[in-house]
Amino acid sequence: MKRFTCPHCGEPSFTPLQKALAGSLRSRGKPCPHCGKRCCNSMASIYFSTVVSLIAFVSIMAIYLLSDNSLPYILIMAAIIAGSLLLNFLFNMFFGKLVQPIRIMN
Ligand SMILES: [Zn+2]
């Protein structure tokens, strides 16, 4: 399995799942299992999630305005929100790299 390198100690200590759970640059990040310093996903992750959320928002607005908002459409809207969250998660799992969080935490 592909592993991701910690920006602090250079060890390939993050699994894809751990990286996906590390959060964005604005979060606190996740401590490296090797050196214990915090890491999070890079700007690429924020750009990707911004684009995905924008597409999801536009689709939901389109469905809201064009449909009669009966149950099937509400389910489709919920599926779009769930899908966009899942896409962000998968992106963090397989793409982008780990960086140091911007916030300084002790
Ligand atoms: Zn480390």
Image (cartoon, grey):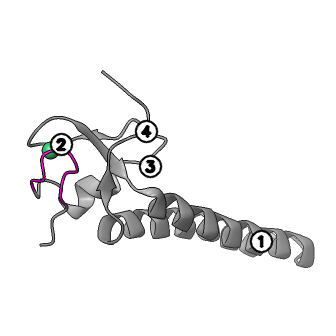
The residues bearing labels 3 and 1 have C-alpha atoms spaced at a distance of 23 Å
In magenta stretch: residue 52: no
Q: What kind of element bears circle 1?
A: helix
Residue 2: numbered disc: none
Magenta stretch: helix, strand or loop mostly: loop
Q: Residue furthest bottom?
A: 66
- What kind of residue is marked 2? Cys
Residue drawn at the location 33% of the way across and 57% of the way down = 20
Amino acid at pointer 4: Ile
Alpha-carbon span between mark 1 and mark 2: 37 Å
Nearer to us of marks 1 and 2 is: 2
Q: Is residue 76 left or right of residue 31?
A: right
N-terminal label among 3 and 1: 3
> In the rendered image of this protein, does residue 104 appear above or below residue 78?
above
Q: Is mark 2 within 8 Å of ligand 1?
A: yes
Instruction: Answer few, some or many: residues within 10 Å of disc 3's Cα (few below 14, many 20 plus, some between 14 and 19).
Output: many
What is the crowding at mark 4: few (fewer than 14 residues within 10 Å), some, or many (at least 20)?
A: some
- Magenta-tinted stretch: 5-11
Outermost top residue: 106
Residue for badge 3: 24
Distance of mark 4 from mark 3, alpha carbons?
10 Å
Q: Which residue is mark 4?
A: 102
Residue 32, numbered label: 2
The answer to whether the residues at label 4 and label 3 have Cβ atoms under 8 Å apart is no
Q: Residue 100's quadrant in the figure?
A: top left
